[in-house]
Amino acid sequence: MRSNPTNATLAWRIKPLIHALALAPFALLVYRLLGGTLGFNPVEDLTRETGIWSLRFLLLCLAITPLRTLTGLYWLTRLRRMLGLYAFFYGLCHFVVYFLWDQSLDLARVLDDILERPYITVGAAALGLMVPLAVTSTRALRRRLRRHWNRLHRLIYPIGGLVLLHYFWLTRADYREPAVYAVIFVLLLGLRLGSMSRRRSWAPTKRQRRRNRVVGDESE
Ligand code: HEM
């Protein structure tokens, strides 16, 4: 993305608000936990809330590029990394709750669960795939990895698919809520694939690229 001071300033101004909004569900959960105002099964509440917030941030992160294209608000791109990291943060909290309270810190039990329960297997795969994205999310690594970074970060789509599979698999009766998230995901995926194929049809040939010395794709 071509950066200009207006984009940077707008993103810089809005970031504290996004941090406050993103941390509010976490703060509320801690408050309810300490105050004993969670439901009849607090561990289930904590697991479900952290899981759903992780999925919401994942979808918000995926929505940034289509939103930027639709609105022309280029500074939105600067919020993408932050939203992705919050998806990872809530995913980690989700796992910590499960590991700490559900499995009583018993690693062998966790491994058995991952091997034996398919919905846990796909959840673990999703979280595992989020790790390299979080680790390489810094600007320095993005610059260093260039095109490989873009390829690596497309993993966010298979991750989204795995999380939805996890959600559908664990749902026993009412599929309406996971279905709403699945529709949003499919829409975002469709927009992404559409813009990728449009960009490919406009892309310069190898020879033109060599001639123009176009390297990498900073606008991803
Ligand atoms: C090792 C990784 C993971 C484990 C062990 C795990 C485990 C669980 C468990 C035990 C539940 C509750 C099941 C129930 O109440 O019947 C759950 C629900 C859920 N998890 Fe995970 N999960 C993992 C990864 C993830 C990730 C990475 C995400 C999102 C990015 C996610 C999103 C969700 C969602 C959306 C729900 C349902 C929430 C609801 O019912 O409102 N999970 N997970």
Image: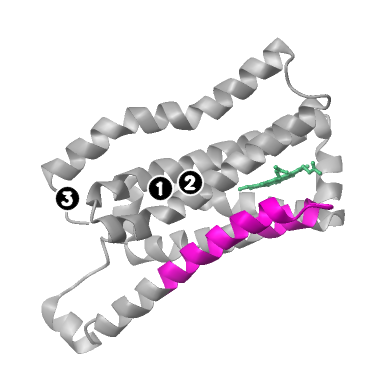
Q: Which mark is residue 137?
A: 1
Q: Mark 2 is on which residue type?
A: Ala
Q: Position of residue 50 (x, y in %)?
A: 64, 36
Cβ–Cβ under 8 Å for marks 2 and 1: yes
- Magenta-highlighted residues: 164-193
Q: In terms of sequence position, does the residue under pointer 2 or pointer 3 come before the other?
A: 3
- Residue linked to disc 2: 134
Q: Mark 1 is on which residue type?
A: Ser
Q: Residue at x 46, y 46 (%)?
A: 84
Tell me if residue 7 comes above or below residue 198 in the rendering: above
Q: Mark 3 is on which residue type?
A: Ser
Which of 173/188 is in front?
A: 173
Which of 173/191 is in front?
A: 173
**Residue 220 seen in render:** yes
**Residue 125 seen in render:** no
Q: Residue furthest top?
A: 35
- Residue linked to disc 3: 3
Judged by depth in the image, the label closer to the viewer, 2 or 3, is 3
Q: Position of residue 60 (x, y in %)?
A: 46, 48
Q: Quadrant of ligand 1?
A: top right
